[in-house]
Amino acid sequence: MIMSLFIGIIFGTISGLMFKYVDSLGKHPVKETSLILLLGYASYLSAEALHLSGILSLFCCGVILAIYTYPNLSKDA
């Protein structure tokens, strides 16, 4: 159960750092939206592949995304 949370935190942190420091993402709102969906799904799939709770991993990733990634999105996304 702890590892599921850890996987969600890792993917959420990667997303937050990527949207903060990669400036070219702000010019492409469709890429921003797609990356958010794909990173959340990657969190779920990674946990499921390791036979952990994918739902818990996705929930934790979503919380991190809401706190750290949302403020770094462009207005169009």
Image (spheres, rainbow, N blue to C red):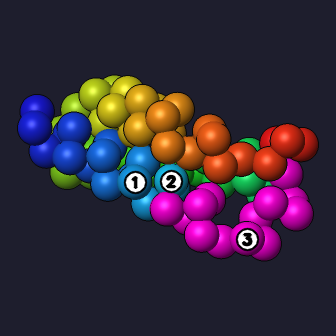
Identity of the residue furthest to the left in this view: 2
Q: Earlier in the sequence, mark 1 or mark 3?
A: 1
* Location of mark 2 (residue): 16
Quadrant of the image occupied by residue 77: top right
Tell me if mark 3 has few (under 14), some (14-19) or many (20+) residues whose alpha carbon lies within 10 angstroms of its own: few
Q: Is 7 displayed left or right of 52 in the figure?
A: right
Q: Earlier in the sequence, mark 3 or mark 2?
A: 2
**Residue 32 seen in the figure:** yes
What percent of the width, then of the height, locates residue 34?
72, 50
Looking at the image, which residue is at 41% across and 38% down?
A: 64
- Per the model, the C-alpha gap separating discs 2 and 1 is 5 Å
Quarter of the image that includes the N terminus: top left
Quadrant of the image occupied by residue 28: bottom right
* Location of mark 1 (residue): 13
Quadrant of the image occupied by residue 3: top left
What percent of the width, then of the height, locates residue 22?
65, 71
Residue 18 part of the magenta-drawn span: yes
Q: Are marks 2 and 1 in contact (CB under 8 Å)?
A: yes
Residue 65 part of the magenta-drawn span: no
Please, what is the three-letter code of the amino acid marked with disc 3?
Asp
Please, what is the three-letter code of the amino acid marked with disc 1?
Thr
* Callout in the foreground (1, 3): 3
Query: Which mark identifies residue 23?
Result: 3
What percent of the width, then of the height, locates residue 57?
31, 36
In the image, is residue 14 above or below residue 3? Answer: below
Please, what is the three-letter code of the amino acid marked with disc 2?
Gly
What percent of the width, then of the height, locates residue 15?
51, 55
Nearest the camera: 74 or 37?
A: 74
What are the residue bounds of the magenta stretch?
17-29
- Per the model, the C-alpha gap separating discs 3 and 2 is 13 Å
Q: Secondary structure at mark 1?
A: helix
Q: Secondary structure at mark 3?
A: helix
